[in-house]
Amino acid sequence: MTGRLSRVVLALAMHSLGAQNRPWAQAMQGEFAVAEADGRALRFACGCLLGAWRMLPRHGEGRFTLTSYALSLGVLLPIGVLLAKAAMSGFPFVMASAGTAGFLWGQGTFRSLLDPGTQCLAPALIAPMLALAACHGLLAWWVLDRDWPRVVMASRLGAAAITALVIVMACAGLSLATLAPACLILAAECAAVTALAAWQAKGLGEELI
Amino acid sequence: MLALLAALGARTPDWWHGYELMKETGLASGTIYPLLMRMTEQGLVEAEWREPEQPGRPPRHAYRLTAAGLALARQQNDLQDAPGGAAVPA
C-alpha cells in the first residue's frame, strides 16, 4: 500500500515538473528506486512532490497549471455552485426581499413573479439555470484537462442555456435586466478561458529562472 | 546550497547520485533537487546519466561540481576557515 502510494506521489511530482524539466523528473525516478530499496520511498516521493510544487511558479507550464487551477477551482466551480443554488431558490422568476444574498443564502422572503398563466414556465426557467450550472462543472474539469474542443462545447452549451433562459423569460414577461450581472460574469469567464487557451497555444511562455 | 556545495566539493572530481547527496547533507529530496537544478543552470554543477547498477532499474543522474562550482566551493571554504570569516549568503 505504501509502495503504491509512494509511486502515485512520485508520478504526481514528475508530472508537476512539466515537460521542460523532464530529465529532472527522470532523475528523481532513478533515485526513487534506490530510496525504495532503502525503505524510504514515501518520504523521498513526498519531498520530490513538495520540491516540484515549490518550483511551479518558476516555469511556464507550472504557472499555467496554477492559473488553470485558480480559474477552475476558484472561479468556475464556485460560480457553478452559486448558479445551482440560485436556481433551486427560484431565480430568475422569484423575487427575494434580500436580493442576491437571498437567492444564495436563502435569506428574507420570496415572491413568485409568475402569474397563474405563466406558472407552467417555471420548470423551463429552472432547467436552463441548472444546465448552466452543470456546464460550469464540465468547463472546470475540461479546463484542467486542457481539452479545448470540449471547453468550446461546454461554452456553447452554456450559451445555449442562457439563450433559452432569455427566450423563456421573455415569454413569461419577466424583466431581462435581472440576468445582466450573470451575463457579465459569464462573459468575463469566457474571456478568461479564451486567454488561458491562447496562453497554451503560444507555448506557455518563457522560463523565469 | 552551502551544504550541497561543501559535499560536492569534498569529493571532487567524483560523481554523486542524488540519494547519496541527500544522505551526506541531510537535506530532503524536495530541497536537493531544486538546488541541483538551479546550480546546474548557473553552471556550478554538471550532470550526466549513468547506467543502472542493477538490471531492471532506471538510469541514474550523477552530479559533480564544474570548475566554476569548485572555485566557489574553495572560496567558500577559505571564508569559513578564515578567523572571524563569514559565509557568503546562498
Image: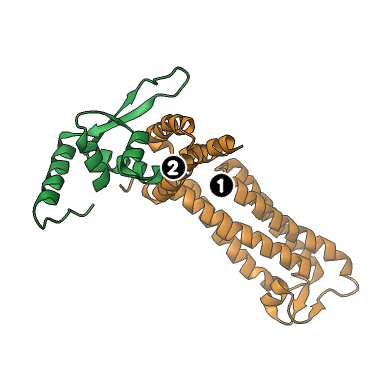
Chain colours: A orange, B green
Spot occupied by residue A184 in the image (x, y as percentages of width and height)? 58, 65
Amino acid type of the residue that numbered disc 1 sits on in the rendered structure: Leu
**Relative depth, front residue between B37 and A170:** B37
- Residue A23 or A208: which is nearer the viewer? A23
Judge from the rendering whether residue B16 lies leftward or rightward of residue A6; answer left or right. left
Query: Label 2 neighbourhood size at 10 Å, few (<14), some (14-19), many (20+)?
Result: many
Report the disc number at residue A144. 1
Left or right: where A92 falls relative to A45: right
Q: Residue furthest right?
A: A116
Quarter holding residue A169 = bottom right
Counting other residues with Cα less than 10 Å from the Cα at mark 1, is it few (<14), some (14-19), or many (20 or more)?
A: some
Q: Is residue A123 above or below residue A150?
A: below
| Residue A195 visible, this orientation | no
Q: Disc 2: which chain?
A: A
The tag on residue A48 is 2
Q: Element at badge 2?
A: helix
Asked whether A41 or A165 is in front, the reply is: A41
Furthest toward the top, the residue is B55
Residue at 45% in and 17% down: B55
Mark 1 or mark 2: name the one nearer the start of the chain: 2
- Looking at the rendered image, the quarter that the N terminus of chain A falls into is top right
**Image location (x, y in percent) of residue B50:** 34, 23
- The residue under the point 21% across, 33% down is B11
Q: Is residue A58 above or below residue B47?
A: below
Q: SS of the residue at dot 1?
A: helix
Tell which subunit mark 1 falls on. Answer: A
Image side of residue A61 versus residue A132, left or right: left
**Kind of residue at badge 2:** Cys
**Observer-nearest of B40 and A149:** B40
